[in-house]
Image (cartoon, rainbow, N blue to C red):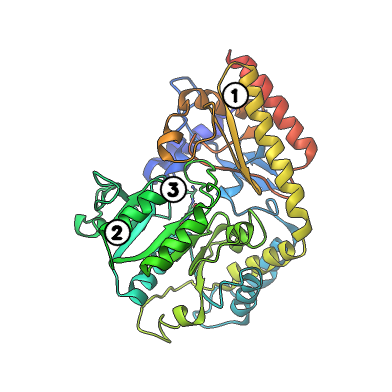
Amino acid sequence: MGSTRTRSEQLFASASEVLVGGVNSPVRAFRGVALDEPHKRSPLFIERAEGPWLYDVDGNGYIDYVLSWGPMLLGHADPKVIEAVSLQARKGTSFGAPCGLEEQLARLVIQAFPSVEKLRFVSSGTEATMSALRLARGVTGREKLIKCEGCYHGHGDSFLVKAGSGVATLGLPDSPGVPADLARHTLTVPYNDLDAMRQAFEHNAGAVAAVFLEPVVGNMGCVPPDEGYLQGARALCDEFGALLVFDEVMTGFRISLGGAQAHYGVRPDITTFGKVIGGGLPVGAFGASRAVMGQLAPEGPIYQAGTLSGNPLAMAAGIATISQLLARQDDYPVLAARTRHLAEGIAAAARDAGHPASATAVGSMFSVFLRATAPRNWEEVKASDAATFRRFFWAMQERGVYLAPSAFEAGFTSFLHTDALVEQTLAAARESFAAMG
Ligand code: KE4
């Protein structure tokens, strides 16, 4: 139970003197859930984690449904991952030269993703997507990009763009520091809207290098694709000569062993990876056919590089992680069913307390939206009751459940989230909604 948060609050105050917002990634600052009540505005500082559990610096334990925003599919401090990293660390932490571990992890990833013949490791999902965009632009000789409102592909300039006045018009910067001249090359359309995507292509004939999709959106909460949406995007890319990029940073190895492309049977031209493939260490990757990847330096002219790309420690963690996942393929449906039961149970608890609620779940990622019907796009997500979510977030934390500190983020389960822990979570949800009144 979250009995006291004193030490967390002290650490947050002191960290805020030297770290921007007291954190190293904005969503962690809890600004999306802050309430004007004591002890309900600053983040927990974590001391350690094990399996499905997080333990804060005040000694409180929580069932963790954030899992480092996705990577910890095997649970925290997986013994084989820890052993692999410990053994490798004694041999040195970075060589700046090739080592055999990079090929080992690449072959494990490719084994699960047949659309990928060659890949390049980087150190984050952002690096993977920004490099994939440069590759797509270089391969096609085109400059424009189509992305969807509510989808997040990391903080690369071309992705921090909001929709222009109309779906077919050019993008506008969504952050200071993003040049308007760059933003105008990004076209933003609603998710699950093939007509809008077609319009964007037709208004920019011959100029679109790629369509970037979260094949199951995690960054506006978990929003699945409509039946036929991914297939339709594939067909439009083929019709207009653009590359289809599946950003599987969140979905890769999570919604199925082969990610969304296996789950839905749609083959992208480029796939980006992150999170799970590093087993909690900094790893991203992007991959495609030999013909496309062969355009990348040093084989081809499109430049991309990284000091810690393919880092031995990160590769060791990834190998230990993906090896175990490849051996657990039969466990994925069980975890998917448990995750759906969790999401639907929380939504039922909300409705029983008088709050409209709906649940989405694909594999081991899920969301509960405080609105009557599951949203299909960002406009519908925005209509959720975020104020009630903020109160629910703290009520659950007080009952030992750690949810994502935003109404617009997906939740995650791990293979160590047992039925008993799910039932414990559902009991906490019922108590929370009852206590909220
Ligand atoms: P990173 O650069 O954070 O490793 O990956 C960027 C990224 C790319 N593509 C997708 C689909 C992603 O979900 C992400 C990162 N996801 C967020 C969670 N919504 C990371 C959490 C954070 O920003 O702190």
**Ligand 1 closer than 8 Å to label 3 CB:** yes
Q: Is residue 250 above or below residue 242?
A: above
* Residue at disc 1, secondary structure: helix
* Amino acid type, residue under disc 2 in the picture: Glu
Q: Is residue 180 above or below residue 403?
A: below
Which residue: 51% across, 72% down? 287
Measure how far apart labels 3 and 2 are at the Cα level.
Answer: 37 Å
* Amino acid type, residue under disc 3 in the picture: Ser
Which residue is tagged 1?
395
Q: Is residue 42 above or below residue 185?
A: above
Mark before the other along the chain sequence, 1 or 3: 3
* Amino acid type, residue under disc 1 in the picture: Ala
Residue located farthest toward the bottom when viewing the structure as drawn: 299
What is the quadrant of residue 27 in the picture? top left
Mark before the other along the chain sequence, 3 or 2: 3
Which residue is tagged 2?
202
* Residue at disc 2, secondary structure: helix
Check if mark 2's residue and mark 1's residue have beta carbons within 8 Å. no
Measured from the top left, where is residue 13 in percent x and y? 43, 35
Q: Quadrant of the N terminus?
A: top right
**Mark drawn on residue 379:** none
- The answer, for residue 91, to whether it is visible in the render is no
Measured from the top left, where is residue 210 in percent x and y? 38, 64
Closest to the observer: 132 or 144? 144
Question: Mark 2 packing: few (<14 Cα in 10 Å), some, or many (20+)?
Answer: some
- The answer, for residue 353, to whether it is visible in the render is yes
**Mark drawn on residue 25:** 3
